[in-house]
Amino acid sequence: MDVLKDKQLKYELYDNKGFVILQDCMPRMLDAKKQTADYAIAAMARVSYGNIELKSDEDDKKLINRLVEMHHTSPLEGVQFKFVMQIPIYVARQLIRHRTAKVNEYSMRYSKAIDDFYFPPLRTQDKVNKQQSVELKSANNDIVTSYKNACQKSQNLIKEYNDLISKDCAREVARSILPVAEMTKLVWCMDAHNLFKFLKLRCDRSTAQKEIVDLADAIFNLITPIIPVTCEAVKKYWINSATFSTDEMNILCKTIDTLPAIMAIKKSEELNERQKTALLIKLKLSDKAKMLLSH
Ligand SMILES: Cc1cc2nc3c(=O)[nH]c(=O)nc-3n(C[C@H](O)[C@H](O)[C@H](O)COP(=O)(O)OP(=O)(O)OC[C@H]3O[C@@H](n4cnc5c(N)ncnc54)[C@H](O)[C@@H]3O)c2cc1C
């Protein structure tokens, strides 16, 4: 069976001026007994024990959760995705920093510039967080008019570009007058491990720019039906998790009221015994737990 069959393969983005398509993936053809490509990750991991037979979906789920929890990530690199996308150049510049991708970009040396731009909705600079912008709350006509006029001027540059081309200006020279809101096209390939690193960073609305978050969300939606169990595990252990610095850990450990915290962990139904012990060790509560619970 083809793993891409009956799946949503395209998301429109940037007011329909851009898109992302899941063009291909590996493995593409599924083993007859399997519905999704999750099994390929579990099967790759089982080689560690010399095992090459397929196991049940339930066994695969347990193993994948354990792999993700323990950051045993190389089996995730056995699954690969190929996307085709049309995005503004300023988003592509951020995307290109994810160096483990294999990329080929539309060339404005060989082809004429794409006659489309995406100017994001006007936002103002966050006063506290340099990485953030904020929605325009009150209608500040001055900035609205300035932005609208500037976008129009930028967009008009395509006419001057076309004029230069018609006068035999080289495409590689003429392109230099165009703004970063100009659309570009990319083929972008990544393995699941590095793709999840990308998604953890770029689905984060508190740090990443909205326009790359929109792309990252669409990519997450495209791969979820292909490796649903892995995506769920990644959300649980990586995307929705947080790390703490030494100072933060010290504050946390000091603040936690020992007995209620230990009891809450011991009684929790979300964690198994191994995970409870690991959490007590992380919170430096394991010695106290042994002492209190032995009485
Ligand atoms: C909010 C935010 C703001 C950012 N601001 C800027 C900025 O202002 N300027 C800027 O240039 N970038 C910026 N970046 C990009 C950032 O510095 C990283 O380059 C980008 O997030 C890619 O992360 P990565 O290295 O984990 O991914 P990848 O490049 O895909 O690498 C994946 C993993 O492979 C390994 N790896 C890859 N390359 C190497 C290498 N050369 N050496 C050793 N290990 C490697 C690392 O383990 C890495 O985590 C920003 C990113 C975010 C999320």
Image: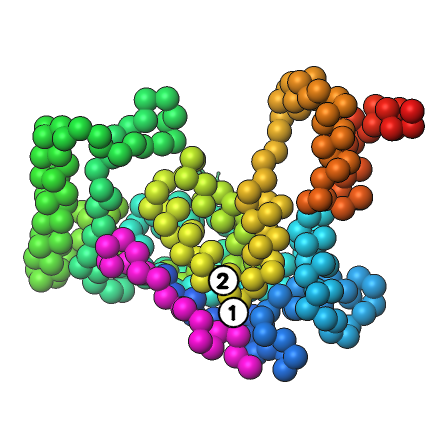
Closer-to-camera residue (131/105) = 131
Mark 2 is on which residue type? Ile
Q: Position of residue 148 (x, y in %)?
A: 11, 40
Lower position in the chain sequence, tag 1 or tag 2 = 1
Contact check, label 1 and label 2, Cβ < 8 Å: yes
Judged left or right of residue 244, residue 4 is left
- Mark 1 within 8 Å of ligand 1, using the beta carbon: no
Report if residue 173 is visible in the image. Answer: no
The residue under the point 42% across, 35% down is: 206
SS category of the residue bearing label 1: strand
SS category of the residue bearing label 2: helix
The residue under the point 25% across, 30% down is: 124
The residue under the point 77% across, 72% down is: 52
Q: Is residue 197 magenta?
A: no
Q: In which quarter of the image is residue 149?
A: top left
Residue range in magenta is: 1-19
- Alpha-carbon span between mark 1 and mark 2: 9 Å
Relative vertical location of residue 268 with respect to residue 171 in this rendering, above or below: above
Closer-to-camera residue (270/283) = 270
Mark 1 is on which residue type? Cys
Mark 1 surroundings within 10 Å by alpha-carbon count, few (fewer than 14), some (14 through 19), many (20 or more): many
Q: Position of residue 208 (x, y in %)?
A: 41, 39
According to the image, label 2 marks what residue?
Answer: 223
Q: Main secondary structure of the magenta part?
A: loop
Number of numbered discs: 2
The disc label shown at residue 25, or none: 1
